[in-house]
Image (tube, rainbow, N blue to C red):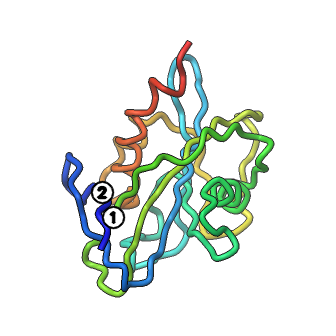
Amino acid sequence: MTVTKAMQPGCGHWKPLFADEKKPVITGVGLVLCTLYFGSIRVLVTEETKDKPLIRKKKGMRSIPFETIEARDGDNLVSVMERCAHEELGIESWEMRIFGAVPESFRLFPEVTEYDIVTRYGIAEYLGDEQRRFVAPAGDTRVVGWMTIDQLLGLPPSELRVETRPVMEHFIGYLPKLFRS
């Protein structure tokens, strides 16, 4: 057994959870792709086009883009972030400055007993034309566009993917480190 800092749904604090090493692990990696616009941080938001009951994902839910770690990725979360940007947003790695993946992980699906589902995320700054048309080549999502964090988190809970609120609230704590003058 290993201990990981994680946030349970509905909790506003960190607590240790035990990861059962016997269950297969599925790790989803979110990409907080942000830009600074007139003093406000905006993130690129996607909308789900398919249901995925295992992780309580429903068509129409919004979030930052997420991609699942595949065998070809190994432990390279930056590689997953680049693949996520390409598959979910239609952008290339040279169009963003990757700050990296945060060290914390989240376990937000305690009701799933057959897998250990882990959520991670990384942060990148978009360097391209913010007015361009973003297209999700993979087709599992559609790109909604840029939103401030308050706009995203202001959506009704039924319209947000489960991972969105904990990841974005955690991200808010990284903002002073990222955008220092």
Looking at the image, which residue is at 72% across and 49% down? 134
| Residue drawn 61% across the image and 38% down it | 99
Q: Quadrant of the N terminus?
A: bottom left
- Residue 117 in the figure: left or right of residue 64: left
- Dot 1 falls on a residue whose secondary structure is loop
Badge 1 is on which residue? 107
Q: CA distance from mark 1 to mark 2?
A: 6 Å
Circle 1/circle 2 CB separation < 8 Å? yes
Q: Quadrant of residue 107?
A: bottom left
Q: Find disc 2 in the rendering and name its residue.
A: 6
Label 1, residues with CA under 10 Å away: few <14, some 14-19, many ≥20: many
Under tag 2, what secondary structure? Answer: strand
Q: Position of residue 180 (x, y in %)?
A: 53, 17
What's under tag 2, amino acid-wise? Ala
- Residue at 66% from the left image edge and 68% from the top image edge: 73
For the point 42% across and 39% down, the residue is 171
Q: Earlier in the sequence, mark 1 or mark 2?
A: 2
Nearer the observer, 169 or 138: 169
When the figure is inspected, residue 177 is found, relative to residue 1, above or below; the finding is above
**Rendered location of residue 156, percent (x, y):** 31, 51
Q: Position of residue 153 (x, y in %)?
A: 36, 43
Corner quadrant of residue 9: bottom left
**Quadrant of the rendering where the C terminus is positioned:** top right
The image quadrant of residue 72 is bottom right
Is 49 situated above or below 123?
A: below
Amino acid, disc 1 = Arg
